[in-house]
Each structure stands twice: as C-alpha cells, then as structure tokens.
Image (cartoon, rainbow, N blue to C red):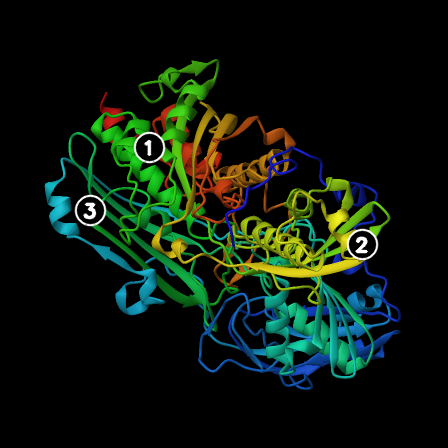
Amino acid sequence: MNKIQEPKAAIGQAIDRVEGRLKVTGRAKYASEFPVEGVVYAQGLNSTVAKGRITRIDTAEAERQPGVMKVITHQNALKLATPDEKLLKLDTKAIAPVLQSPEIHWYGEFVGVVVAETFEQAQHAARLVKFEYEKDEHRTEYKDAGEDDSYAPSEDMQHRRGDVEAGMAKADARVEVTYRTPVEHHHPMELHAVIAEWDGEKLKVYMPAQMVNDATIGISDTFQIPKENVHVISPFLGGGFGSKLQAQEHVMLGAMAAKMVDRPVQLTVTRQQMFTNTGLRQENFQRMQLGATRDGKLTALVHDTLSHTSTEKEYQEPCGAASKMLYQAPNARITHRLVPINLPYPWAMRAPGEATGAYALECALDELAWKLNMDPVELRIINDTQVDPSNDKPFSSRLLNECLRIGAKRFGWDERPKEPRSRREGNWLVGYGVSSASRAAPLQKSAAKIILERDGDNLQATVQTDATDIGTGSYTIIAQTAADYLGLPVERVAVELGNSDFPTSAGSGGSWGAASFTNGVRSACLNITDTLVTLAGHDSTQGDDLVTLMKKADLTRHEAEGSASPTEEFDDYSVYSFGANFAEVWVDADTGMSRLKRILSVGSAGTILNPKTAYSQVLGGLVMGLGMTFMEQSKVEPNHGNFITRSLSDYHVPVNLDLADIQVVFLPEEDKIANPMGVKGIGELGIVGVASALANAVFNATGKRMRDLPITPEKLIATELEPGLARK
Ligand code: MOS
C-alpha cells in the first residue's frame, strides 16, 4: 500500500462519547438486561470448605420449593471438557470446566446451581441445598515457601543478564528489601452475568466479554461443540479490569443449566461470589536488590517474586515485567515462582505485573535515592536507556525522561521537602513522591467491516467489529477513526461492537484494544475506498469523495473488510507507553491517616485519539492506584480459608471524597513503528507506578518506609522511622 496522508480531523478531538446518551438514558443494554423470552433464573452454590470432597448432597427440600426446576451438582452435571494436565494454564481462551468432580480446591468453589422460574425462587432454594464434605487440611499461606515448596511457572518469566553478584560487589550503595502486595479483586461495577439460550446445538450467550472471540473459543471448547455454534453478544460492559477477559465457570454453569432445563437461563454472579469465582490479583512477595555507584548508575538489579496460584489453575502476574526493561542495569535477575494453595485462581487484573511490580521497583529506587542522597527524579533520568536491556532492541519511542522532567517542572518538584518528615501543615505531615511508569503497547490482529449506504448525496457508514467497549470509549474512538478515513463527519458513522458475528478483533485487554481496533478500522476504510475507486473506473480517488465514487459506480450500498496486524518492523523494536507520576500526600501525624492531596500523571502514548476519553482512562487508573495504595485488600481467614472481606463495605475502594487535584498530561509523540496511526495503549499505564509515587510521598512525609500494601493508619503507626532518620 502506498504511503497515505494520515488524516486528523476528528481524531485527536475531545468529542463526547457517541454512546453517552444511550448510557445515561438506560438504553445501553448490559448482558443481564436483554429481554429474552421465557428466561428462567439460576443461582450458583459455593463450597464451604477450602479443600476436600463432597460426600453427600441433599437436594430434596430445595426441589420441593415452588418454581424450582432443577438442582444441578457434580452428580448430574453435563460432561464438559477437562484439562489434559493437572494444572490448567489460564489464558483468555481457556476452558472452564465446572461441577465435574466432588473434589474441592478452594472455599467458595462452585458446587452446584439451582434453576427456578424466578430469581427470588432460585435464591431461596439455593439456601436449602445441603452438602456434606470430607475435609482435608488446606493451605492458604505460603510466604515462607522455599525452593522445594515452589516452582517456576515458565522459562520466559525468568530473565538473567550479566553477573548480578559482581554488579552488587561493585556497588557503593545497596538496597535489599521485600515488598508485599495483598490479594485484590477486580470488582467492576457491573456484576458478571450470563443469559444462555440453546437452539438445538447452537448456543447464544449474552455476557460481558472483554474478548468476544476468545469467549466463543472458551465456551465451544468447554462444551466441545463447533465454535461456529457459539454466538456471543456483548455490546456494553460495566468495567472489566481483566476479570472479563475470558468465559469463566459461571458462563458454563449458565449454559449447562439452560441445556438441562431446555429454557434460556440467566445467571448473575453475586458481589460475594465475585470474591471467589471470577479471578483475583494474587498476593505477591517481591524481593528487590539494587546496587548503584555513588553517581547513581545501577550496577545490579534483582527482582524475585513469590506468588500463589490455585491447586488446579495456573496464572502468574509478571511482577518483574518493568524491572526487566525500564532501566539500564547491566546485571539483572528477574524470577517468578509460584506456590499452589487453596485459594480461588488468580488472574490478570489491570496492568498485571506492572501495577504490583512497579510498586516494588519504584519504591526500591526511592530507597536507593535516599541512600545515595540523590534526587529520585535524577536517579531515574541517569538510568534511562533508549535500548531495551532485556532484548537489546531499540525502543520505538521512549519519552520517559521527558515525562519526568516536564512533570517535575509542572508539579513544582523543587518545592519537595528535602528531608523526610520536615514539613508540617498543622497536624499533617506533607510529602512528595515520584515514580516512572511503563506498559507494553502491543498491536494484535484486528479486523473490521465498513458498510456504506448512500441515499442521494447522503452517505451513512456503519462499522462492525467484535471489539468491545468496557467503559473505555471504544465506540467513540472507532467512530472518530472511521469518520476521518472515510472523509465523513462523526455523526455519519454508526458503530456496532461486541458481537461474534462481526469480524474478529483483538478485544479489550492488555492495553492493545485502542491501537488494534482503530488500525483495523483504518484498514477497512482504506479497502472500501480502494474498491470504490476501482468500481468507479479510476486509478485513484482523483479528488472524488465517497459519494461521488459510489455514484460513478452506480452503487447505493457497498461494504468491505480490513484488518491490521503488527508490521515486521514491529518485532525489531520494543514498543511501550511511558509515564511519570508525581504525588503530594498528607499524613495525619497522630492517626496515621493518609490523604492524597494532588497527583500529576504525565504520559507518552503516541497518538491520543480522544483527549477526553484518554483522560478518563488515566484518571480511572490513578484512582484505582489510589485504592491499591491505601485501601484495597482481600483478607483470608486462615482457619477456614475463606475471604472475610465479602462486600464493598469491607473491601474498600476510593470514593469521591478520597480524590484530590488530579491532573493528566500527554506529551505529543509520534510513533509510526507502533502502528500506522501511532496509537499506543493507556488502559493500564495509568495505574502503573501510582502506589509507589504515593508510598514514596508517605516516606517523604513521615520518614517511614511502607513495604506492605495497603498503607493503612494502623500499619503506619506501627512502622518505625527509617534507621538513618531515627539517628538524626
Ligand atoms: Mo487487562 S488485566 O488485560 O483487562
């Protein structure tokens, strides 16, 4: 294809969400809202032991209740595909067998489902099904696990370069500390839900799916039916954060129930079940070792992560992902190890690896800067690299130092208290903190179809792709893209998403959505223009718009597909978005209560398609990072192995009153290696580094190193001043 002039009329404009009106008027349909005729309701049942097996089930009383159609347990469940190996490796296409055996692997595992005519009848009867268990000793703790009690999940999670021991020996200053992050849960506002409807061997599934195509694969593989027989519909999602990347067990429960009662079945996962049945961010123990010369050059970097997985499903968030590539450390070792325990399976949660990993890395750098008596911004700048040290590939574009410098200036970093615990405002201790952020900016194959309909001189375009809008603004940026590449106003473009009948896209995940969808749509637009040129008998558009070309070709309707894939050039580079966070935190000197006062995020992520939706994305990441720092944690009661945080009244997330002055800035950046439109992801970048900027600000305010998230008042009060400080 010839080099084309990339248009930018609608692209880059802060236009309102094109689907906004549908949402605020309640006309945007979420999975559980589809009016499916004859629908009945299912309620999942959960185990009340963490390990063992079901020995007896009494369904009689439940079955006697009015409206109850069926109680399904492992004794009468449909046979589903089961994994070939003991540990099922989780990915976005994974099968999700459920009710296939009496064995229990974690507290809250699905052990049955009740189907009834109404939601209330199903809920009522669910309480009356009785299970008896033979209990085995369970394990939910693992922090002291050693080499023989843990395993390395895969070789590509381990990285070594240079000679770490030699690097540490050369260092003038060293940091050796362990950081802990707790179990967190995704908790999108929209509960997981499914409506499943069979028509013979064909299955229609309404569900919130971040990746529609992969959901059809997971479902068809689990039921062992052809993929073409599974139709997934997911036009709107009320958040996902990773928890809706794949079809999980509740989807299979709903579909199984629908098959067995021969009616469409709706199953909504309760908020309590979202602690036990839809994935979690695992607890991580991250051991960091940094060594540096007097002038701040890193001589060695070690990042060893110990995490847990479930005893039958495997996932590990790559906490060392940023440590591997962010700084020019010639000697490095990045390892990840897992211990299988009796907790629900872990799964990707917003910036899996980077969000938690950057907390360890960027706090350790702050500790190093303190030891070197160096400005933490300067320490980061000194260790910048334009070549990815993990694979020796140049970065396609890396403006990290610019983010740090410009951010420092805008934030007023030179006003930072030079000594920790040296600034007070009344009873508040005031501190500043900084962190870097990085997140891979992948492009995944993504296709789209454009339909043009001409009525006289009026042209209407419709874009169809199975891409999803998880609250991020996909509808809007796709409309902007199609408008520009078709030469139409945005109002003339309709966007239809989230349907497996549409061309396969990358789906929303891993910060690849926006870049992949829009480049796929661009490609479809270029194709439709090319084919119209040919049909009109031209060699080029000759300056004609699409209406004129369609008239010349005597067409009132025309459609074409197109798709984007990473270029070959892409593989020769490391492609990332970068950012820097600057935060001011106030800590009450007596109660240890922390408050975010202001935060500035400076990002470089290539073309910003829509500054308004992009701002919202990063804002959401910052707020989630705020929750990660001071609030979010899922606590396990070790004797029973269950989560005792079971609702949003004890699993705390930030509310408006917790927020502060939040500023988001994107630097202009052109990155044509990333993809033709130069778009790089921001869905996850916003949360990366937030916890460290805040924890570093807490240190600057209080002189206390908080190495265990969340930073709660009781932990702050119990933590001693840093030794160097206490001596002063
Ligand atoms: Mo993301 S954790 O790939 O939604």
**In the image, is 443 to the left or to the right of 706?**
right
From the viewer's perspective, is the residue at label 3 or at label 1 nearer?
3
Residue pushed farthest top? Answer: 426
Quadrant of the rendered structure where residue 68 is?
bottom right
Q: What residue does disc 1 label?
A: 720
**In the image, is 305 to the left or to the right of 268?**
left
Q: Residues within 10 Å of mark 3 (few under 14, many from 20)?
A: some
User: Which residue occupies the foreground of this view, 128 or 483?
Assistant: 483
What amino acid does circle 2 point to? Glu
How far apart are labels 2 and 1 at the CA level?
Answer: 70 Å
Numbered badge on residue 453: 2
User: Which residue occupies the foreground of this view, 281 or 436?
Assistant: 436
Quadrant of the rendered structure where residue 256 is?
bottom right
What secondary structure is marked by label 1? Answer: loop
Quadrant of the rendered structure where residue 382 is?
top left
What amino acid does circle 3 point to? Pro
Instruction: Say which residue appears at 42% left-offset and 52% top-offset.
Output: 353
How far apart are labels 3 and 1 at the CA level?
Answer: 34 Å
x, y percent for residue 232? 70, 67
How far apart are labels 3 and 2 at the CA level?
Answer: 58 Å
